[in-house]
Image: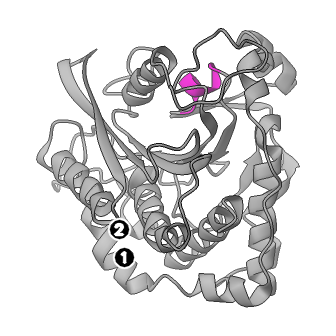
Amino acid sequence: MRYKIAFYLVALVFDTAECYISDQKLTTRTFNKPRSLPQWNITSLASLTNYDEFYGKILRPVLKVRVPQTPGHTEVRKFITKQFEDLKWSVTLDEFEADTPYGLKTFRNIIATLNPVAKTRHVMSAHYDSKLFKPDGNGRQFIGAIDSAVPCAMLIEVARTVTPFFRAKPLSNEVTLQMVFFDGEEAFKDWSPTDSIYGSRHLAQFWKNTADDLAPVNPFAPSVQPTLMDSVQSLILLDLLGAPDPKFFNMFEATSHLFEHLKSKEDALYQANQLEEYKRNKKYFQSVELQQIYIEDDHIPFLREGVPILHLIPVPFPHCWHQLNDDETCLRNSTIHNLIKILRLFTVELFEL
């Protein structure tokens, strides 16, 4: 991904994007305020992850070179797929070919859905490929720990630990949780509209053009066939996570309620004394809105179709971004564990489990 400072109001940003926020599709999306759990439930949820097991069994298997069409990329794709198959989620691959600066390549997005017959879904996502770099003189290769092995592992852990709560009662056919692992986010050479976000561009186009018989009818356009894109209530994108002291900002007005709820979960876990090596003066979720920064990432194709976006990416980017030291040495385990706790609590409350 890349970002630039854009010193104009967010309304102008949307204006340059053809005013997607005013698209009638958004009128079919309704948001209920997530409920808050009592402290004893918060403490119980916070204890669900054994971090050593998470690191060894979930994170470590994805800490490898994952450039598309390399052995490591295939291994990680199969690993992620198996994690969700073992959880009895519905798993599909969005496979396609695309031209790159190095010729035609095959990409595969991984789409895991808890309840595939639900009418709508909240999508949590990350990219699982890693950037192509030449090894250094010592043979050191680019791993992409924060970019985005850790986000992928965090999603798997959240899914693993919240699935029993979903299964404890009849699955809702109104809304479900879906997790998407994008392929080909990284540019092979220089970031451009055609050399970047291959997977998200393809999936957004597919969802936009594919009818969804389960989606609710738009009351403002009842004759229009809803698409798979219309049934996305929100897309939550994780990127560049795992380094110490991240700062997250509310970047989109349409998902302010979700950002504020995440912010409140950080506070609740702090009050319950469940955050490790945590400094109150270095809160993760910031009160200041930062809607003047334009970040190009996997959310862009969906933003252009009117999907509400929650972008969980630290600003400024971690120092190891696109450096060969984006490996295990760049990570702070306590930060990763804390973010897992926050995301899990957020998910449980969002779906009222």
Q: Quadrant of residue 38 in the image?
A: bottom right
Residue at 81%, 67% (x, y): give it. 264
In the rendered image, which residue does mark 1 sit on?
Answer: 55
Residue at 44%, 44% (x, y): give it. 116
- Give x and y (percent) for residue 230: 61, 26
- Residue 303 magenta: yes
The part of the chain drawn in magenta is 299-305
- Give x and y (percent) for residue 336: 53, 71
Q: Amino acid at mark 2?
A: Leu
- Residue 214 magenta: no
- Give x and y (percent) for residue 160: 43, 69
Q: Label 1: few (<14), some or many (≥20) within 10 Å?
A: some
Q: Which mark is residue 59?
A: 2
Q: Can residue 136 be seen here?
A: no
- Give x and y (percent) for residue 350: 70, 59
Q: Amino acid at mark 1?
A: Tyr
Residue at 58%, 30% (x, y): give it. 215
Q: Can residue 271 be seen here?
A: yes
Q: Is residue 267 above or below residue 30?
A: below
* 176 sits to left or right of 80: right
Q: Label 2: few (<14), some or many (≥20) within 10 Å?
A: many
Classify mark 1: helix, strand or loop.
Answer: helix
Q: Is residue 94 above or below residue 260?
A: above
Residue at 79%, 25% (x, y): give it. 27
Circles 1 and 2: CB atoms closer than 8 Å: yes
Q: CA distance from mark 1 to mark 2?
A: 5 Å
Classify mark 2: helix, strand or loop.
Answer: helix
Colour logic: one colour
Q: Quadrant of residue 97 in the image?
A: top left
* 285 sits to left or right of 171: right
Q: Is residue 2 above or below residue 345?
A: above
